[in-house]
Amino acid sequence: MSAHSSENGDKGGMVQQAGNPLPGAPAKKWRAGVLGATGLVGQRLVKLLAGHPWFDLTEVAASERSSGKSYAEAVRWHLDGPVPEVASSLVVKSLDPSLDCDFVFSALDSSVAGNAEQDFARAGYPVVSNSKNHRMDPDVPLLIPEVNASHLDAIRTQQKNRGYDSGFLVTNPNCSTAGLVLVLKPLADAFGLEKVFAVTLQAVSGAGYPGVASMDIHANVIPFISGEEEKMECEPQKLLGKWDGVRFIDAGLGLSAHCNRVPVLEGHLECISVSLKKIASLKEVREALRNFEVDAVLATLPSAIRHPVVVLDGEDRPQPRRDVHAGNGMAAVVGRVRECPLLDIKLTLLSHNLVRGAAGAALLNAELLAARGFLNHRVPTAESQLAQPALQ
């Protein structure tokens, strides 16, 4: 199965097998670089970019200890299958904004991402970031294309504010926020939201590699993930809010989160209760979730699925082992929709923390930027040097 088609072919006629031309594909692919390419999310990005119909992976960059090595030599590969051929022989570069690519994905650790991403944006690179550093900046879009594509309007203001030319920053949310907000969006549209109470059961892969020590997590639950609850209580306000042409206006939700690390490899499970502004039956809630559909433009994006929320009827679903790969990891899976004795409704949702919550989210953001005309083809460094006039 292609990495760019959904499990059920739900792509609105845009199902793509890797390596075949996509209907409406660009005449010239955009060249992508990956910052932090040796990390867990960076590896996911490298794998997703292999055979992508719109993007070619041309640069990988990481810390100084990896610089100068081939990617195959530098990376400790944790994903199924071998290192993609397109990446294996690429020389790992340092985090210097002189890469031969049109834009960069950032999977950098937050300890270095803040300054590095700004350096690349200042140098003219669009930066599509998975890191937390700039998510809540007042002029940086925090983006889930199915939720708030209109927030891309902030890019021009950001460039003006910061003196960027063709570069800019766009971020995707925290891995636990991503699935939550994808489910809240159709409920907000149909009924309005007042309060949300969430308890998360988050996979160990969300902690990166080597992550949580085995002696700490084996047969155990850790009821604390540093900074996670704050992100979950803050980021949805921006995602479900509005860009008014000058600033982002928060959604004004009451939101409380409890975040727990559990011994599951992939997939964040969340149990949420929601207070709605309008009275709705359980049937109406299920229908609103099941019928949530992306628009025609989003449906043409290679990584998008037409119905990004999957509703299951089984009383014991969703489950990470069985449901985490729904929609190639880009769907939020919902089950156990029922009445809540404290708020209005409660349900369980599951999303793939490394795909929908990280690498796949960044890839979809880049595809939307390309479709909206925000990505340009930069002149490769070698060609730029050849084009310079000879010194007299």
Image (cartoon, rainbow, N blue to C red):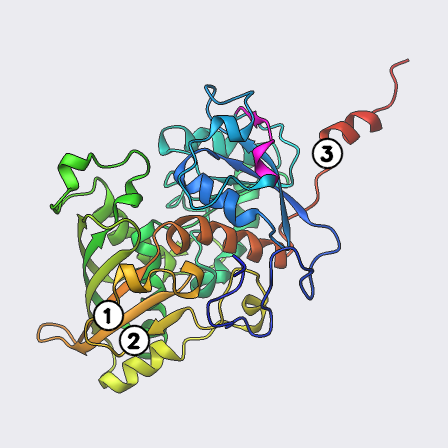
Left/right of residue 8 with respect to residue 325 in the rendered view:
right
* Residue farthest along the front direction in this orientation: 81
Q: How far apart are marks 2 and 1 (CA)?
A: 7 Å
**Do the numbered discs 2 and 1 sit on residues whose CB atoms are within 8 Å?**
yes
Instruction: Determine if residue 372 is in view.
Output: no
Q: Nearer the viewer, residue 5 or 297?
A: 5
Q: Name the residue under label 3.
A: 380
221 over 125 or under it: above or below: below
370 over 88 or under it: above or below: below
Q: Distance between the residues labelled 2 and 3?
A: 48 Å
Describe the element under mark 1 as helix, strand or loop.
loop
Describe the element under mark 2 as helix, strand or loop.
loop
Rendering coords of residue 33 (x, y %) = 58, 38
Q: Which residue is drawn at 35% across and 80% down?
A: 288
**Do the numbered discs 2 and 3 sit on residues whose CB atoms are within 8 Å?**
no
* Residue type pointed to by label 1: Arg
Left/right of residue 135 with respect to residue 83 in the rendered view:
left
* Residue type pointed to by label 2: Leu
Magenta run includes residue 359: no
* Residue type pointed to by label 3: Pro
- Label for residue 312? 2
Q: Which of 122 and 92 is in front in this view?
A: 92
Q: Mark 1 points at which residue?
A: 317
Task: Locate residue 217: give its quadrant.
Answer: top left
Position of the C terminus by quadrant: top right
* Residue farthest along the top direction in this orientation: 392
Q: Which residue is drawn at 34% across and 83% down?
A: 287
